[in-house]
Amino acid sequence: MASKRYAAVGPHCVACGCCVKVCPLSAISIWKGVTAQVDRDRCVGCGKCEKECPAGTIELRARDVGV
């Protein structure tokens, strides 16, 4: 069963990699050295990245639930 939420990276990401280090499922990577990118299929919405982000640009969002 998929999580009801996922991590989303905002526009102020500094690509520091703190979120990558704490993600238990390796769902986050640094894209082209510019920003973090979340693989929504792997993300379980645990919130560790949101707490660790020094820029405060990661937030947990609700997944769209299809019928």
Image: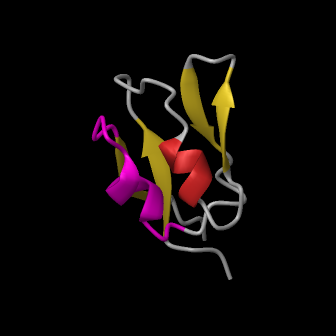
In the rendered image, the residue lying farthest to the bottom is 1
Task: Determine whether 35 is above or below 9 in the image.
Answer: above
Tell me if residue 18 can be seen: yes
Q: Position of residue 51 (x, y in %)?
A: 33, 58
Q: Position of residue 34 (x, y in %)?
A: 56, 16
In the rendered image, the residue lying farthest to the left is 56
Q: Is residue 1 left or right of residue 59?
A: right
Quadrant for the N terminus in the image: bottom right
Q: Position of residue 60 (x, y in %)?
A: 38, 57
In the image, 61 versus 26, the foreground residue is 26
Residue pictured at 64% horizontal, 75% vertical? 2
Quarter holding residue 11: top left
Asked if residue 47 lies in the magenta stretch, the reply is yes
Q: Is residue 66 left or right of residue 8?
A: right
Q: Which residues are magenta?
A: 45-57
Task: Determine whether 7 is above or below 12 in the image.
Answer: below
Q: Position of residue 24 (x, y in %)?
A: 64, 67
Asked if residue 51 lies in the magenta stretch, the reply is yes
Q: Is residue 59 left or right of residue 38?
A: left
Quarter holding residue 55: top left
Q: Is residue 11 left or right of residue 3?
A: left
Give the total of numbered labels: 0
Quadrant for the C terminus in the image: bottom right
Magenta segment, prevailing SS (helix, strand or loop): loop
Tell me if residue 60 can be seen: no
In the image, 66 versus 10, the foreground residue is 10
Colour mode of the rendering: secondary structure
